[in-house]
Amino acid sequence: MARIDLVNLAHSYGTRPRADGDYALKTIDLSFKAGGAYALLGPSGCGKTTLLNLMSGLLTPTQGSILFDGVDVTERTSEERNIAQVFQFPVVYDTMTVYDNLAFPLRNRGVSGEALDSRVRKIADMLGLTASLNQPARRLTADAKQKISLGRGLVRPSVSAMLFDEPLTVIDPQLKWQLRSQLKQLHRQVATTMIYVTHDQTEALTFADTVIVMFDGRIVQIGTPEELFERPNHTFVGYFIGSPGMNVLPAAVEGAVAVVAGHSIPLDRQYEKSSAKTEIGIRPEFVHLAESGQGVPVRIKRIDDVGRYKLARVTLGTLPLNVMVGEDAKLSGDTGSVQFDPRRLHVYRDGELVDGRV
Amino acid sequence: MTDIVVTAKPTAPATATKARVRARSRIGFSWLVPLLYILFLLVPIYWLLNMSFKTTNEILGTFSLWPREFTFANYQRILTDSVWYNGYINSITYATLNTVISVSVALPAAYAFSRYRFLGDKHLFFWLLTNRMAPPAIFALPFFQLYSSVGLFDTHIAVALAHCLFNIPLAVWILEGFMSGVPKEIDETAYVDGYSFQRFFFKIFIPLIAGGIGVAAFFCFMFSWVELLLAKTLTSVAARPIASVMTRTISISGYELGMLAAAGALTIIPGAIVIYFVRNYIAKGFALGRV
Amino acid sequence: MDKTVNNRAWFMVLPVLVVMAFNAVIPLMTVVNYSVQESFAGNVFFFEGTKWFEQVLHSDRFHASLLRQLIFTGTILAIEIPLGVAIALAMPRKGPWVSVCLVLMALPLLIPWNVVGAIWNIFALPSFGLLGRAINGLGISYNFTRDVGAAWFTLILMDVWHWTSLVVLLAYAGLMAIPDAYYQAAKIDGASRWSVFRFIQLPKMRRVLTIAVLLRLMDSFMIYTEPFVLTGGGPGNATTLLSIDLVKIALGQFDLGPAAAMSLIYFLMVLAMSWVFYTVMTRDEARA
């Protein structure tokens, strides 16, 4: 396993990039600890696959360099970098059996005989493929094929990093869950640096210790799943993470008060006055809805039953707001009042989090 | 916990300074192979052009790499004589008609063969191909009787339909081959994402089999274009194909090689245009993951 | 791939069947009709059973043209398929040269077959043709109207020139349809160029190659116009392939019976060979 450093890295698919917009990946500096589990999370087109392919060597960066354990590998091929990659669609060698598929990377590196056999069987066992070792690979189901792809990556004894490009896309929903937990387990067993690209936050948040949120070719925030949930640095991260995402309301903020649609909401910190576009953000989990009483009056539009909780869709003036309420909350009528937990209220100026003074 | 260094506000990347042009020059000689092949193909074509600018006397009288008496007469006669250029228009018309019919009809059938198992599917698939196995000569007389009896003699549509005999099987086979290269998982993913069958077929599936459509369309056009016997049999004046014009006119005035060469050179053009149009389909890669 | 059983798929195949029934089934029945009858003066028919079939199958003339045909088809398949695949592999994948290559390679396919024969006829003339002069200039005595060897050489060269591009186009489109991910995975697995060909390209091109082989097999077996214009079947009957012979019999003797019988036998042979090739080349597709 290797520590990966990205220095001043940027990439454009065009031949003569000039403006910012020509770059699929804007300049970043990033380091991945050896043995860590990372997720690159973001919507389509945010540059995460580009970043992954740059690291694996399938793309050569327009600018910057990539270091594995301090060694500059920017000019080296994927093979030389000794990485493994699992793609969105299962890639197996149709004409070979499962065994031969798993053995292929080893044979190409000159491994044979007993060493080869024991290694292949060990990996097959880890992935639950032992029963199908002698079957032709093309007859297997999609998730088994992805396991084979995974296996080809694992079978090599000293892989510097394993890269996953949305590997669960074609898997059946019920098997997705299974494979997800298997991947997490795998990381504990194998302790290689693993980097997982996805647009699905559940996958990212379950798999990774550190999540890197990307948007429009830039890194927006890096942190543990908890950090991203509790303290989103940008309104985008707030929207994107959590289901449903964070509520973002335009407000005027000065001192320890935020004014939203004419109502005052107390904050637990002091903020300077500013002319920048200001918003407050709070997750539905931290908004309290009651039939009446203290707080900001709202109209209740709809209550969705999501199983473990209910989601109330309300409007504060004209602004929509989602509130999480308990299963047995009693709400009747179409008005109510909400209170915001001031410790969970964040203030954003121009989309970015600002810290107030205590 | 994690040591991350992130620039707070990413700046626009410095332009030319670190632009690295990967000199991945393939110092292989693989480009030599297509080049030699194309040269091989072009030599007789150059010879054809050579002949087309000569008089027949010169063609049969002397050997010359370049026309001694350069003449446009052959081309002039062809392009000014309405019989000739109508011949071209007729051929283009029925070949295009045939291509459109064959490919459109073949698309759903190929999809069915590719995705579904149904009663008799394997045998039907092979039977289609058998229709290309009989020399068209066998069908000449029966076709003549058949199309005359439905009043379609000497029409473009008659030739277009007649050519479906061998073009539809070809189109079905080619399209099925390409469709089978697209994993069924893509269909299923699209349905899960809420696509209706029509939207899926036209927005997702067809772009993925673009290569197959390009090749099928070109081959249908080509085989219809060059087919002589049925086209001659089913037409007389109104829809007379260029091939028929060539052989008739030439035999009347003697074996006019210069004219034949010029006419032959001109017949290359419509097909060249067709393949130019479908070239992007044929050369299109199939990038998984962009769905 | 796992196909789902769905008998309503017949509706998707229906348009094809309608057109084909009109074009194929009806006329074919007419031919079968002729093949079992004897005709005098074209309008009077007597049912003669299998007499014509037996006559054709036992004739030496038939055996001779069949042999020539088999040699011809075998040779061109052995040349055109590997050559076509090799060229497709060597062609550029993207960039401006792709269009140029594709258009230029398509040109021989577009020339009417009688013109193809005519071009090569003149081209190969020892006196006035570029090829003829060139070969004779090298010291090799070459005259395709007189020498059997020269005639066959010219015939085969003409067919390779004419039809290899069909294989190239099919193979190229098939290659382009292979998703990038396979090449990427192979790179990561450390596969050699040969491995990539053997384990990725060739298997994925199998369907396309089947089409190419079957097409060339059938078309070369039925070839008529080009060799007829090139050599007329000569010198003597050295290049009289099956269909040339068939037409000679039909036109020369005005005997619809033997001609139709021969046509049917011909058709059945092509059918049998295609069936064999088809089964062999797609056998791995068969699922339990």
Image (cartoon, coloured by chain):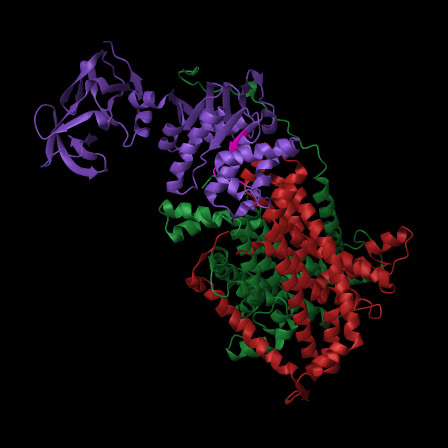
Residue drawn at (85%, 61%) of the image: C149
Looking at the image, which is closer to me, B54 or C177?
C177
Residue drawn at (18%, 13%) of the image: A256
Residue B242 drawn in magenta: no
Residue drawn at (47%, 28%) of the image: A22
Relative placement, left or right, of B116 versus B43 is left
Residue C189 in view in this figure: no
Q: In the rendered image, which quarter is residue C34 located in? A: bottom right
Looking at the image, which is closer to me, B222 or C269?
C269
Number of marks in picture: 0
x then y, percent, for residue C184: 56, 35
x then y, percent, for residue B157: 52, 68
x then y, percent, for residue A79: 60, 29
Residue drawn at (64%, 74%) of the image: B138
Looking at the image, which is closer to me, A106 or C50?
A106
The relative height of residue B213 versus residue B91 in the rendered view (above or below) is above
> Magenta segment, which residues?
A84-91
Relative placement, left or right, of A358 versus C192 is left
Residue A85 drawn in magenta: yes
Q: In the rendered image, which quarter is residue B9 located in? A: top left
Colour in which chain B is shown? green
Image quarter of the C terminus of chain A? top left
- Our reading of the magenta stretch's main secondary structure is loop
Residue A39 in view in this figure: yes
x then y, percent, for residue A4: 51, 20
The residue lying furthest to the top in this view is A358
Can you tell which chain is drawn purple? Answer: A
The relative height of residue B275 versus residue A33 in the rendered view (above or below) is below
Colour in which chain C is shown? red
